[in-house]
Image (cartoon, grey):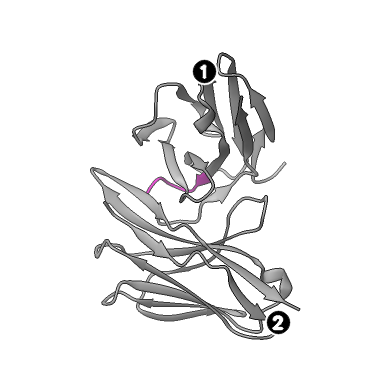
Amino acid sequence: QKEVEQNSGPLSVPEGAIASLNCTYSDRGSQSFFWYRQYSGKSPELIMFIYSNGDKEDGRFTAQLNKASQYVSLLIRDSQPSDSATYLCAVPSYAGNNRKLIWGLGTSLAVNP
Amino acid sequence: ETGVTQTPRHLVMGMTNKKSLKCEQHLGHNAMYWYKQSAKKPLELMFVYSLEERVENNSVPSRFSPECPNSSHLFLHLHTLQPEDSALYLCASSQDGQMNTEAFFGQGTRLTVV
């Protein structure tokens, strides 16, 4: 059973701090990794994806991928109250003959003013 | 209209009812998905359609019946549901069904089975 693990939180950080969210996955063959943000009562929306080992930066967001250790993390710099949401990690994985997205439970982030 | 639209947003149904959820995407995508989101559980993929052909049925009970008449529309027909089927049902679309591109989600249908 392919799995994606995330700490459910809640993770609480003060405004302006760096929020660090982690995700580990079990399928060594996975090649791409997605971070989605889901506000309460809303649907998930993509904020970052990463394919290569190392860091990928987009504004205040940085995704870090380490395939050898099978983890991918998301750093949010200068955290804002509007960043308060659940962050979902998703990893494509083969199940039988088809590829499917395996989702983590999500980490709840609260940014306190 | 843009993006992925789901109707209805909320649905309450009895265990003997028959209802349908509707999803429409205006993004020109070739793949559409039904997901179930329950509290304390990861998103569960239910069905995948690629170019109107079902390519994934993730061991979903037969009381859930999908229909994809064309690449822009997806339905989920519901009958004789159980209370444990109460959840948020999310439709999504992506450029293809290979899971390497962004999935765009609709706002979901909050289903309550009584």
Span colored in magenta: B93-98
Q: Which label was assigned to residue A46?
A: none
User: Residue farthest to the right?
Assistant: A113
Is disc 1 surrounded by few (<14), some (14 to 19) or many (20+) residues within 10 Å?
Answer: some
Q: CA distance from mark 1 to mark 2?
A: 47 Å
Subunit of label 1:
B
**Local SS, label 2:** loop
Q: Which label was assigned to residue B79?
A: 1
Where does the C terminus of chain A fall, quadrant-wise? bottom right
Magenta stretch holds residue B96: yes
**Quadrant hosting residue A80:** bottom right
Q: Position of residue A23 (x, y in %)?
A: 41, 69
Marks counted in the figure total 2
Magenta stretch holds residue A107: no
Q: Which residue is mark 2?
A: A15
- What kind of residue is marked 1? His
Q: Position of residue B66 (x, y in %)?
A: 47, 26
Q: Give the camera-side residue of B44 and B47.
A: B44
**Quadrant hosting residue B100:** bottom left
Residue occupying the point 38% across, 53% down: A102
Residue occupying the point 36% across, 68% down: A24
Q: B6 above or below A66?
A: above
Q: B108 above or below A7?
A: above
Q: Position of residue A85 (x, y in %)?
A: 63, 64
- What kind of residue is marked 2? Glu
Subunit of label 2:
A
Q: Give the camera-side residue of A59 and B44.
A: B44
Residue occupying the point 45% across, 75% down: A73
